[in-house]
Amino acid sequence: MGAAGSTLRVPDPATFDVPDAALVAAQRAVDRGLCPECFGRLLGRLGHGLTNPQRAAVLRERLGGSLPPLTQPCSVCGGLFDRLPIWVERAVRAAEGYEWHRFTCGSRWDAELLAREEALWIEVGTEWGESIRSAFNRELGKLVEARSGAVGGPERPDLVLLADLPVGRVELTVQPLYVQGRYRKLDRSLPQTRWPCRRCRGRGCDACGGTGKTYPTSVEELVAAPLLTATGAEGTRFHGMGREDIDARMLGDGRPFVLELLRPRKRTVDLGAATQDVLKGSGGRVEVRNLRSADAHDVERVKEASPEKSYRIGVLGGVPVAKVNETLELVVGRAIAQRTPTRVAHRRSDRVRSRRIVAARLVDANEGRFTLDVRTEAGTYVKEWVEGDGGRTDPSLAGLLGTALRVEFLDVMEIHDSEAM
Ligand SMILES: [Zn+2]
Ligand SMILES: [Zn+2]
């Protein structure tokens, strides 16, 4: 279909307007031992819509039919363009076993061959040449399209097919498959991502029972499991819009994430079934919503977002209700200074950040404990805001109430990103 369409669009070669200087350059190239592809490409940026062999035919006619037939391999490409069908076979074979709908062609070249072409441009005096690399990539792409039914182009390829010309093979790069959605975590013992054992760094040791992991599983692994099976991917990368503490639940509409499936064999996945399988496979500990396809831009979006968050916090501390209410009124909208908490100091630089409590209210109180709903700016350390972190957060709730407080439990109730449902 595509091939027939482009044939129809070929302009009448009679309208191919060749400047005199270009014709002079073509004349100089006549006895250089060039194949029609390489001869036509010398003026490849003229006569838009013609193939290089068509361009060569027109030029040969304008020059009085004086392009002699080749008695040995083309002096520029060495017959490469005649061997395109072999490269198509190599490309298709390299991609065997993978589902692909879009692809990009590239090629690796002998530098000497590329230099030879540029020298030829200077010798014959053409300023209209097209590089052999771009012509080869384009022609290979067209043939691979016709052979496979997949669409070639630079946009969002499933596969990159790199023809390594000196080596004689096609190198395959399988692009990741991206799935996005939101997750809810209903368990207080799950990290968000796989957590390699600190002692053995993932190799397996006595401390981790040979698993290489600090925690038996994670949101990442539980979400990925059915998708790994469905796609035959070799691994995953998990990108969350921030992360909650291991012992915090993630409730409400859940937290946005993008899961990258590496080297997938299948790309058509039943995301409805995967949604069910995550719930079943995790024993109800993790739930995903609104699973849909994504791309690399979504990874950036999710990583760069800094949404406000709502928490429900259970606090241990005997304080009169009236005093809690009074104090909460004082803290809303006010800046708090937070020095990097001790517990994350090993992975965050030690500095003081200014954050804001957006809203706070007392939900209930009894017997030396109370529950708060708090909405904060992105990046607020909520536990430290309640407890004070030994004065590193100022003012803290404990500081304002003049009593020691301890967070008993903490749940993320909502991530207030722009796409919140
Ligand atoms: Zn050639
Ligand atoms: Zn270990």
Image: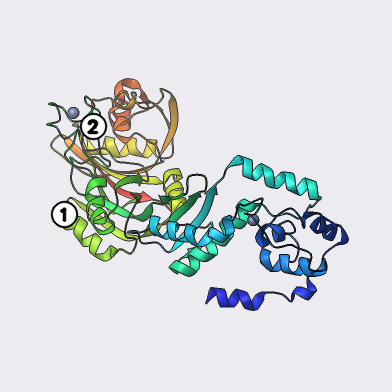
**What mark, if any, has residue 314 been given in the picture?**
none
309 or 191: nearer the eye? 191
Residue 368 appears left or right of 168? left
Circle 2 residue? 202
Whichever of labels 1 and 2 marks the residue nearer the N terminus, that label is 2
User: Is residue 83 positioned above or below 147 on the image?
Assistant: above
332 or 44: nearer the eye? 44
- Image spot of residue 269 (x, y percent): 30, 63
Mark 1 or 2, closer to the camera: 2
Residue 286 appears left or right of 269? left
Cβ of mark 2 under 8 Å from ligand 2: the answer is: yes
Cβ of mark 1 under 8 Å from ligand 2: the answer is: no
The residue under the point 40% across, 22% down is 350
In the displayed orientation, state which residue is furthest to the right: 20
Mark 2: few/some/many CA within 10 Å (<14, 14-19, 20+)? some
Q: Give amino acid for label 2.
A: Gly
Q: Give the colour scheme shown.
A: rainbow
Circle 1 residue? 281
- Image spot of residue 227 (x, y percent): 26, 56
Residue 147 appears left or right of 382? right
- Image spot of residue 225 (x, y percent): 22, 52
Question: For numbered disc 2, what is the local secondary structure?
Answer: loop
Mark 1: few/some/many CA within 10 Å (<14, 14-19, 20+)? some
The C terminus, quarter of image: bottom left
User: Is residue 301 positioned above or below 366 on the image?
Assistant: below
The residue under the point 42% across, 44% down is 303
In the displayed orientation, state which residue is furthest to the front: 71
